[in-house]
Amino acid sequence: MKTSVARKILMALSGFFLLLFLLQHLTINSLSVVSEDVFNNVSHFMGTNWIVQFLLQPVLLFGVIFHLVMGLYLDIQNQRARNIKYAQNNPGTNSSWMSRNMKITGIMILLFLGLHFADFWIPELNTKFIEGDMSGMKESGFGLRYFEELQHKFTEVWRVAIYVLAFVFLSLHLLHGFQSAFQSVGFNHNKYTPWIKKLGNLYAIVVPLGFIIIAIYHYTTQL
Amino acid sequence: MSDKLMKLTLKIWRQKDADSPGKMESYQVEGISEHMSFLEMLDVFNEQQINQGNEPVAFDHDCREGICGMCSLQINGEPHGPDRGVTTCQLHMRMFNDGDTITIEPFRAKAFPVIKDLVVDRTSFDRIQHAGGFISVNTSGNTQDANNIPVEKENADKAFDAATCIGCGACVAACKNASAMLFVSAKVSQFALLPQGKIEAKDRVLNMVHQMDEEGFGNCSNTGACEVECPKGISLENIARMNREYLKASLTKE
Ligand code: HEM
Ligand code: SF4
Ligand code: FES
């Protein structure tokens, strides 16, 4: 934690962790397209299993907070390192927009997380821990509630639009971030790095697109 | 090949000394041949300024053949100008056209304070070198010939490539974070790849990274701007190697 290199390595490790989490999240979301029952059962398991709830969930929360606090901290240091700006700057000739704007795309993701938590996580905490209803059942008492709750969120077009936009920002974040994290932990090899970059582009497009398709699917099936 | 002489508008950062505020000023220069180097163009400009009774603009230079690392300048928003793989002294005026406006600024970084006009103080790089950019060699009369120690070809080539860094600071100037990682990683790699460098390997990377932070350089975001602008083509591979060396050293050093 003491030096720039150590902080960058930790930044990359938290990034890797989030990349893995995102795959898991996408897998479960895809189940909602495949089968209502399977989605309900897996959601109920994730929402009530104590290892997931009291071990994995706090670790995830810590990972997200660590990543964003460290990212913003590094950015403040970086601003300070160039106290006088150039009168004319031509950064487009030597680097990509994505690589220069990780803070912007990151903050967009953070804003989205606010909405996303308000949509799902906070109501979930409320149902389970304030109202004390751990059953996962609908109020009617017939069947699990998760799929229905998911559907109810994707009825307004503005919300779907925000979700889609957020995943575009996530895509931009990862188009740089995926391969950058490998470089940060010291992995750069002429044989493998070109493939890591290709894999990174694939991940950064396919995963956010997956989330987008699922959101639009639920919106259109309810029209 | 046209021998028509160019007339240019120069926007140059003028600053009296380290403590004065500076500002951009506009000038005209004429009689510039496309065969001149950028520094020769500035020589002509200064001569014209002196003839008009004005103070010439101060800029750094020494070898004028791309090997000393003394010349600098942010030209139209890029360190060492728009060409690739060259220093400012090797940049030809044929990269520009008659009537162009060229913006010339000093390399900007908190760790490179301006001394005067376009001259910046790059001794922060020297202090990083002092912190670990050396090896111990027995000089008591029985010095071993370095050629007696075999080095794997791949490593020898990479060490040589890293050693071509001339310490100009263009990497810092190009980086949006004013990070010195490319320079420091070249200096670390040059030794890390050779048997002679193994002895101080751990202390070297830890101390040089520590000094780099002390000097107030920014963090690396892996934008890759440094590699593109580096006149010697120092590769980002070196930064990854430095991070590996750092990780190894910090985990194993007692
Ligand atoms: C919560 C909002 C987020 C913020 C504010 C944020 C911010 C940042 C910033 C500023 C950086 C650049 C750090 C640097 O240049 O040194 C970064 C890098 C990165 N981020 Fe994020 N991020 C967020 C969310 C995410 C998410 C959800 C993921 C992945 C699923 C992610 C994956 C990455 C990766 C892989 C890197 C590259 C690490 C590296 O360069 O070594 N980020 N983030
Ligand atoms: S790495 Fe390249 S740009 Fe940086 S100081 Fe060395 S030669 Fe100059
Ligand atoms: S003056 Fe020596 S490298 Fe340009």
Image (cartoon, coloured by chain):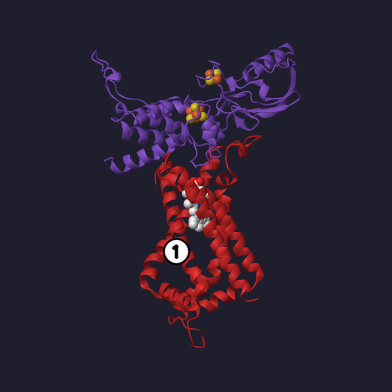
Q: Which chain is red?
A: A
Few, some or many residues within 10 Å of mark 1 (<14, 14–19, 20+): few
Q: Residue at x 62, y 72 (%)?
A: A219
The x, y position of residue B246, in whole percent, is: 36, 39
Question: Which quarter of the figure has residue B141?
Answer: top left
Q: Residue at x 50, y 42 (%)?
A: B222
On the image, numbered disc 1 is attached to which residue?
A: A24
Residue lying at the far left of the rendered structure: B142
| Residue B109 can be seen in this image | no
The amino acid at mark 1 is Gln
Element class at badge 1: helix
The x, y position of residue A40, in whole percent, is: 47, 77
Q: Which chain is purple?
A: B
Question: Which quarter of the figure has residue B114?
Answer: top right
From the viewer's perspective, is residue A203 above or below residue A132? Answer: above
From the viewer's perspective, is residue B54 above or below residue B157? Answer: above
Q: Is residue A37 left or right of residue A212?
A: left
Q: Residue at x 39, y 27 (%)?
A: B157
